[in-house]
Image (spheres, rainbow, N blue to C red):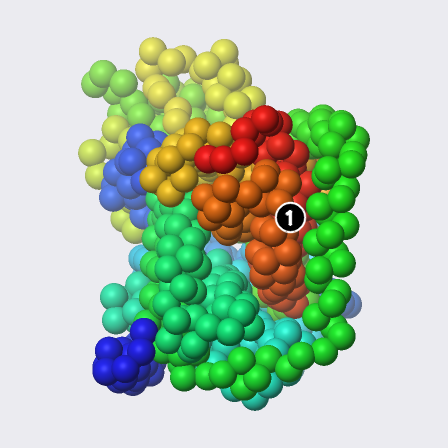
């Protein structure tokens, strides 16, 4: 683009850049476990109805304080109690509970009174208090650690607390905790996760942008060694990133945990487009063409090929939109938009600037330019002289890859998604080791026919299931309506630990029921619905891995069917943890469907571009190898397939096809000149091979930037994409020439 049209194009882009600067400030960040719920799932709909009748299972914030010598010390207990009372005044907190505020009900001849669980002002009773508390299943793992070195205060927060309120709550809570001389304190819960993980997202985006920018600057310096060449490349890439992020802000798109990939993605995709178009423009100038003629040829040949690579890359990302998980779908849509933004920036901005420059303004000649022809000649010679060896090597690698794929697991854990070496991660581990962990696991209880859950025959079944749950070491903090009956049983017997048991007969149960009716409604309504036909068994399960938890759930379901009266009551596992874990199943199915759809669409695009079934076949086969190798790396390196990792395959397929299109487009152009097949392949290696290698090297190191991330899935994503894109380059350079010679044998022209 030259002349007046070029100036108009530059002016428009400057206006867009100015608007983008504003909209970047409007970017929204969010981290919400509900984002990862598989939409349209029947179990999700059941869970939402369940929450409507009871309450959400993640509207809590737990604070634990630790004392290595033990918590039963007067000053420590006083401070802890004072802190517990202070937390009741915090905004967004609706209820608090700790051992220092908990009391045993005590039946006397005159009335029911209460006794504190801990006699704070009577140290002489501490040993007796401790023995009783550690023998009570209501407290251990819930409010006190088994070694009696940590205490918890449970804060009930407003349902679905939002980011601003979560930030304020955590900051206010930290301010309050700093007033006391506790050895250490730890937090766990939705509000804490939101605050810390959104802060991580912001740091990751800034870090990836800065490191990627520095990397690209170094690469451009090594390639061009001229101020204008480096400046045009960097400004073009930076402008593409700015416009893309501004577009996200203008559209109100929320950035999630995997958004740190956007800067890396935009920078390396933009770099790839810039390198291809600049390389072609410089080559045309070298042939003696004028700047106007050189840019016209460049846009005609490379512009079309780059358009096709952008479309195929966008299709690859678009395949993620088949996912039922919102963050994955959003990433696919946003990334596809980003690829097209990068392309438009190169065509309507970079090309205009290039058309103003002479060759010696863009690149400095030197001996280093002789390196690439030698490398390309080596690839050409190997594929021509040793095609059988190369083919046998490919088959061997294929077999190794298929075995690696068989090793893939989906037993991912929450801890594997937590930022490395951070307080939130150490806090998470602390609660896993000393308390009941984070993952909620509820069991919905539905009485059948005209029965109510408060009827003895139903309540007895609920107690059976509750007792069975206690046989699983990973299941902690179990509570149900039967817990109330056990507590009343203990109350009627001087709060002896041995008396904490479910009523043995219906008469005793009915007696206790009259006492339960006198309890505050808010205590009962969280466990039994208003109609009395549904109840919940609430618990938390340790972060032992999605597949392990799935097996535990299957065992529980099997036991329930075999050991409870299913004619009277139905038990259905539900809860936040269960719904999120279903992602693994959906990820596998949507991944296959999405990639299959992407392959079909890319095939259609290839048909429009090449109009030759042989080139279409050649373009697809080498790009299946990187996908298989990505799966093999997952298996061999023990990386669990989870929501974040699933995007790897779309990224690989979308980007890997780019080099193939550039290679085959050049080959097709050469064949139209009626040259021999070998000459067409050789010229393609010499003229397009360098750009392909340079962009692949940029992609390789660009995604390796993710190794600096503190987010483990991002590290794995960067590692996997870098290795597999490098393998995609080798697959193209080794396999395509051999396939071309095989399919075009004895045919000299297209």
The residue lying toward the viewer, choosing from 570 and 240, is 240
Determine whether, in the image, residue 572 is placed left or right of residue 212: left
Asked if residue 298 shows in the view, the reply is yes
The answer to which of 498 and 220 lies nearer the viewer is 220
The residue at 34%/19% (across/down) is 569
Q: Is residue 557 left or right of residue 10?
A: right
Q: How many marks?
A: 1
Q: Quadrant of residue 191?
A: bottom left
- Horizontal arrangement in the rendering, residue 404 relative to residue 454 (left or right): right
Q: Residue at x 22, y 39 (%)?
A: 530
- The residue under label 1 is 682
Quarter holding the N terminus is bottom left
Q: Residues within 10 Å of mark 1 (few under 14, many from 20)?
A: many
Q: Is residue 531 above or below residue 148?
A: above
Residue 280 at what x, y percent from top left? 50, 65
Percent from the top left, x then y, of residue 114?
Answer: 45, 56
Which percent across, then down, holds residue 612? 42, 32
Q: Nearer the viewer, residue 170 or 748?
A: 748
The extreme bottom residue here reads: 227
Q: Position of residue 307 (x, y in %)?
A: 37, 55
**Is disc 1 placed on a helix, strand or loop?**
helix
Q: What residue is rendered at 74% in x and 73% in y?
A: 368
């Amino acid at each position: 683009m030259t002349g007046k049209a070029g100036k108009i194009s530059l002016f428009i882009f400057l206006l867009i850049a100015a608007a983008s600067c504003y909209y970047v400030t409007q970017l929204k960040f969010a981290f919400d476990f509900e984002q990862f719920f598989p939409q349209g799932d029947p179990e999700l709909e059941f869970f939402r109805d369940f929450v409507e009748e009871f309450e959400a299972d993640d509207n809590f914030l737990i604070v634990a304080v630790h004392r290595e010598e033990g918590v039963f010390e007067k000053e420590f207990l006083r401070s802890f109690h004072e802190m517990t009372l202070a937390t009741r005044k915090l905004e967004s907190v609706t209820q608090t509970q700790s051992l220092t505020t908990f009391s045993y009900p005590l039946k006397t001849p005159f009335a029911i009174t209460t006794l504190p669980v801990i006699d704070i002002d009577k140290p002489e009773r501490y040993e007796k208090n401790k023995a009783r508390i550690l023998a009570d299943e209501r407290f251990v793992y819930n409010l006190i650690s088994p070694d009696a070195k940590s205490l918890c205060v449970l804060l009930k927060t407003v349902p679905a607390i939002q980011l601003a309120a979560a930030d304020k709550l955590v900051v206010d809570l930290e301010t309050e905790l700093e007033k006391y001389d506790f050895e250490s304190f730890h937090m766990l819960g939705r509000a804490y996760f939101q605050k810390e993980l959104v802060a991580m997202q912001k740091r990751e985006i800034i870090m990836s942008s800065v490191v990627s920018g520095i990397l690209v600057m170094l690469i451009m310096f090594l390639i061009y060694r001229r101020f204008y060449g480096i400046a045009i490349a960097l400004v073009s890439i930076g402008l593409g990133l700015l416009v893309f992020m501004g577009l996200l802000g203008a559209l109100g798109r929320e950035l999630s945990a995997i958004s740190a990939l956007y800067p890396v993605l935009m920078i390396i995709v933009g770099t790839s487009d810039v390198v291809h178009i600049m390389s072609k423009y410089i080559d045309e100038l070298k042939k003696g063409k004028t700047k106007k003629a050189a840019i016209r040829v460049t846009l005609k040949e490379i512009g079309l090929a780059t358009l096709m690579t952008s479309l195929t890359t966008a299709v690859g990302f678009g395949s993620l939109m088949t996912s039922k998980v919102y963050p994955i779908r959003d990433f696919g849509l946003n990334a596809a938009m980003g690829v097209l933004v990068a392309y438009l920036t190169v065509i309507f901005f970079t090309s205009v600037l290039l058309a103003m420059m002479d060759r010696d303004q863009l690149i400095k000649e030197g001996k280093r330019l002789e390196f690439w022809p030698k490398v390309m000649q080596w690839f050409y010679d190997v594929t021509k002289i040793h095609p059988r060896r190369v083919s046998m090597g490919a088959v061997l690698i294929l077999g190794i890859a298929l075995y690696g794929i068989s090793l893939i697991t989906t037993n991912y854990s929450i801890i594997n998604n937590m930022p490395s070496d951070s307080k939130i991660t150490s806090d998470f581990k602390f609660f896993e080791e000393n308390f009941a962990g984070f993952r909620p696991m509820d069991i919905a209880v539905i009485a059948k026919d005209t029965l109510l859950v408060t009827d003895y025959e139903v309540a007895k079944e609920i107690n059976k299931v509750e007792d069975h749950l206690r046989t699983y070491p990973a299941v902690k903090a179990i509570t149900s309506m039967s817990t109330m009956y056990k507590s009343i049983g203990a109350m009627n017997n001087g709060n002896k630990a041995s008396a904490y048991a479910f009523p043995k007969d219906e008469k005793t149960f009915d007696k206790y029921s009259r006492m339960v009716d006198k309890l505050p409604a808010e205590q009962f309504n969280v466990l039994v619905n208003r109609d009395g036909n549904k109840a919940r068994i609430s618990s938390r399960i340790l972060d032992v891995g999605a597949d392990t938890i799935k097996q535990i759930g299957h065992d529980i379901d099997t036991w329930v069917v075999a050991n409870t009266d299913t004619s009277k009551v139905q038990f259905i596992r539900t809860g936040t943890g269960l719904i999120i874990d279903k992602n693994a199943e959906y990820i596998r199915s949507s991944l296959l469907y999405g990639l299959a759809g992407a392959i079909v669409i890319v095939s259609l695009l290839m048909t429009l571009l090449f109009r030759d079934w042989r080139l279409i076949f050649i373009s697809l086969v080498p790009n299946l190898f990187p996908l298989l190798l990505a799966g093999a790396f997952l298996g061999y390196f023990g990386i669990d397939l989870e929501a974040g990792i699933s995007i790897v395959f779309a990224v690989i397929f979308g980007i890997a096809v780019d080099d193939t299109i550039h290679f085959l487009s050049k080959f097709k152009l050469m064949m139209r000149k009626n040259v021999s097949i070998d000459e067409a392949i050789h010229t393609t290696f010499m003229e397009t091979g360098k750009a392909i290698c340079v962009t692949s090297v940029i992609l390789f190191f660009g995604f390796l930037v993710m190794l600096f991330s503190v987010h483990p899935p991002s590290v794995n994503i960067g590692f996997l994409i870098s290795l597999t894109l490098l393998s995609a380059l080798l697959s193209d350079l080794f396999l395509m020439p051999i396939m071309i010679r095989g399919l075009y044998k004895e045919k000299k022209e297209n």
